[in-house]
Amino acid sequence: MGSDQNILVKLNKAGFSLNNKWLVKGVTLQVEKGRIVTLIGPNGSGKSTTAKIALGIYKKIDGSVEKYTNKVGYVPQKISIDWTLPLRVNDFMVLTESLDKESIDEALSLTGVIHLKDKNLGDLSGGEFQRVLLARAISKKPELLVLDEPVQGVDFTGEIALYELIKKISDELNCGILLISHDLHTVMSATDHVVCLNGHVCCSGSPMDVAKNNKYKALFGEQASQILSRYEHRHDHVHTSEGEIKKN
Amino acid sequence: MLDDFFIRALIAGVGVAIVTGPLGCFVVWRRLSYFGDTLAHSALLGVTLAYSMEFNIAFSVFIISSLIALTLIQLQKRTNLPGDALLGLLAHSSLAVGLVVIGFLSFIRFDIMGLLFGDILAVTVDDLLIIWIGGALILLVLKLIWKSLFASTVNYELAEAEGLNPDRAKAIFTILMAAIIAISIKMVGLLLITGMLIIPAAMARNISSSPQKMVIYSIIGGLLSVILGLFSSLEFNTASGPSIIAASLFLFILSLLNIKQSIKLKN
């Protein structure tokens, strides 16, 4: 753990419930400058909810969240944009912060979509739009980046390139990244800290620790060269809708 | 020059159109046309109160419309009724109460038609001041909240996550809506104010490729509607509000031709 002034956001036993059902409960984690924290876990395990708690989108939360920066870039998992708005990529880039042309062009070039700059946002493909979303989040040179499945719908080679880019951005801008991903194979090698969620924190630590924490340790031993690219994880319990834990 | 009622109406109309242009874009983008209607209907109550207490009409309408807007927000939080039902409830009940109050004020001569559809003969020099000073204030505030209002119109969560305070922007925008209705009621009439907000913006949507362009075209469309409408109102002796709205409809139909062309180009 780094010193205190490096902390960008800190969740302390944070939880959020909707209609008397806990979406996630008791999450303690912190994101520091220059580090990548990855949230993993099955569908409905509260990854996006945790991200929204950290961002301050959910306000009536249990526990506490302390945010020490206002320079935030966010790539949401789902985004619905209303097409009654005539919106080009260029307009979208300056949505939350005014930027000069160089910053816009640089970010769009980094994610490989500079050629789409004057296109209407509604005319982009899913993967193209995802690249624009990432470009928008990094263009303002944030201190904290929250990326909720940032490469969904991106082609395979693009996916690897974008993960490399995310790692590079974390180093160059020295920003903290809260990353959510299902693609364990590619992500794990670039991650400093992993938090495994399943409605609560199952386990957390370095990728190695989390991997060791798991019953599939033997598998890593056999294939040491791909130690983290073969990471798998299984949950030994499920959560009922009442919030109880049931062993499998 | 200001002695001529027509010049006064023209200056008033130009002032209104410059403000309804950008506000109208947000009404279209945020799907608030029925909300605008509700505020406009409630304006009648404001007018009757102004008459009975010998108060300034624009100011009284602004207060009543703001109160209705706040009531709506509270009702949305505290009931399970859908938004459109609540809007209908407030629109028609405030209109009805307004009409009932008019019934009690039999000692005052009322020009109901003028209230509902606008009356260019009624625009005074004081009204011009209210329109231009009020309009300038509205535009100034809109400029201040523009970034967060626009960002949250595109996506609420992005705006909230990146520190733009969309809830505050929304509340302020609601007050601005009440203000524009208050200052334009004499020109356009309370039944047609929403038309003045929506139709030029809808026309602009058909011919623009970016939000900034849409705002500019919406203002130009509103200005043309006011000028065309007022001249035909003078020429044919029709009410000013309907004439202005009819002119904006004409412009909207012209803009449809542009859509057809661009769809052809795409194919």
Image (cartoon, grey):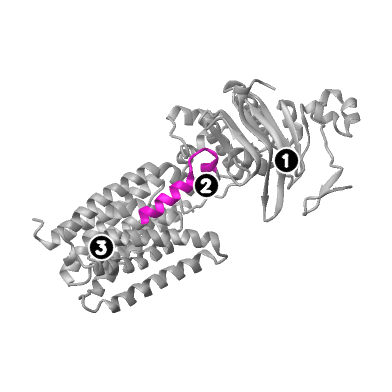
**Chain of the residue under label 3:** B
Nearer to us in this view, A232 or B134 = B134
Residue B58 shows up from this direction = yes
Mark 1 vs mark 2: give the one in front: 1
Instruction: Calculate the distance from the C-alpha at mark 1 to the C-alpha at mark 3.
Output: 56 Å
Q: Are marks 1 and 3 in contact (CB under 8 Å)?
A: no
Residue B255 shows up from this direction = no
Q: Earlier in the sequence, mark 2 or mark 3?
A: 3
Q: Element under label 1?
A: strand
Nearer to us in this view, B119 or B234 = B119
Instruction: Calculate the distance from the C-alpha at mark 1 to the C-alpha at mark 2.
Output: 28 Å
Res. B45 mark: none
Instruction: Calculate the distance from the C-alpha at mark 2 to the C-alpha at mark 3.
Output: 37 Å
Q: Are marks 1 and 2 in contact (CB under 8 Å)?
A: no
Q: Amino acid at mark 2?
A: Asn
Q: Quadrant of the N terminus of chain A?
A: top right
Q: Is residue B197 above or below residue A131?
A: below
Disc 2: which residue? B155
Res. B57 mark: 3
Q: Amino acid at mark 3?
A: Ile
Q: Are marks 2 and 3 in contact (CB under 8 Å)?
A: no
Picture coordinates of residue B218 (x, y %)? 33, 53
Tell me the residue at 69%/30% (across/down): A37
Disc 1: which residue? A26
Q: Is residue B102 above or below residue B197?
A: below
Left or right side of A209 for A66:
left
Q: Element under label 3?
A: helix
Nearer to us in this view, B233 or B90 = B90
Give the quadrant of residue B116.
Answer: bottom left
